[in-house]
Image (cartoon, rainbow, N blue to C red):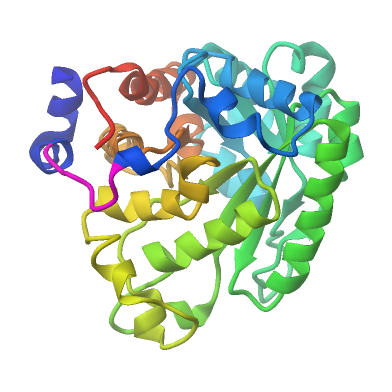
Amino acid sequence: MSKVTDILGDKAESLFNHKCAIDKGTLTLPGADYLDRAWLQSDRSNRVLGSLHSLYNTGNLAGTGYISILPVDQGIEHSAGASFSPNPMYFDPENIVKLAIEAGCSAVASTLGVLGMTARKYAHKIPYVVKINHNELLTYPNTHDQILFASVEQAWDMGAAAVGATIYFGSDESGRQIQEVARAFERAHELGLATILWCYLRNNAFSTQGADYHLAADLTGQANHIGVTIEADIIKQKLPENNGGFTALKFGKSAPQMYGALCTDHPIDLTRYQLLNCYSGRIGLINSGGASGKDDLAEAVYTAVVNKRAGGSGLILGRKAFQKPFNDGVELIKAVQSVYLDKEVTIA
């Protein structure tokens, strides 16, 4: 705990002394028996549960109920040059998988091409999560649209444990994306694969002169709720930064309790509200690590502490790790994992 406290600096007291508006006793929380408590009454087949078991029982966090995923789909989502030029070794797909294994990750998530190129050597050594849709950046002007790049069958053929997909909620094409991903997730479950949904918001109207509500707890929480409705087994969401998107933008439906009794402005409360919308924690919530910058270690540990104390299931951290020298990336991922292994970092 002392090392985590030192990294957090003046933010530590606020994070470790906070008491949540939503009592943790009302939630399904991570733990060694999480899969039994959350899933045995569900419609997921034994094969899907086996795939989830492989995710939650691989790497340094195995058997804890927490997961640590390395996502490297940025070659499409942010362009290969912009993503890999800071560390060109990751133009080679094998080095992506090697980083995930060396860092003790629960899984590696990437594109069909990256994982397909390495599957015969590594798919039995670490769970593969094949990202089946992407936002390509060569259309000009660029549009906020996730289009299918791969099929569920291709992921199954290479021995993947799960498929991942993104929906841009609020975008012009969100309705089509919801339908496409819902069908893909249905097929994935038929084949025994787990499903992970990147629940992101994209709408220029969500950014106003006063604030940017793309990371508002109420809007991202509703995106999460739609995600679990189409049977995502794990929700990936960005850490919330504010609240009140529905009321400020004057659309949708809201209730006063969303901004008071259920959620304060504290980052742990904002994140717990996201978790509440994941069927009160029955579906695991993993927060993203975000872009790389000057204080990656402090930012990553901060995100991990907020996620864990809120009741989340882990972190999915990519650019902060792979845009560094290999060994530095490994150590950063392990530093995040140490938060989830530290019994003194408790659920608020």
Name which residue lies at 46% across and 33% down. Answer: 313
Q: Quadrant of residue 289?
A: top left
Q: Quadrant of residue 296?
A: top left
Q: Residue furthest front?
A: 41
At 91% from the left edge and 28% from the top edge, which residue is drawn?
Answer: 157
Left or right of 267 on screen, residue 3: left
Report the span colored magenta: 17-23
Residue 209 sits above or below residue 256 on the image: below
Q: Position of residue 26 (x, y in %)?
A: 37, 43
Is residue 99 in view?
Answer: yes
Q: Position of residue 315 (x, y in %)?
A: 45, 35
State whether the magenta stretch is mostly helix, strand or loop: loop
Q: Viewer-proximal residue, 70 or 82?
A: 70
Q: Say whether residue 180 is magenta.
A: no
- Image quarter (top left, top right, bottom left or bottom right) of the C terminus: top left
Whether residue 303 is visible to the viewer of this picture, yes or no, is: no
Position of 206 with respect to 161 (left or right) is left
Residue 297, percent from left and from top: 30, 31
Measuring from the top left, give residue 264's x and y in whole percent.
22, 61
Q: Which residue is at a point 31% across and 40% down the rendered structure image?
A: 24
Left or right for 277, reference 20: right
Residue at horizontal 40 percent and vertical 85 percent from the top: 249
In front: 276, or 337? 276
Image position of 193 with respect to 119: above or below = below
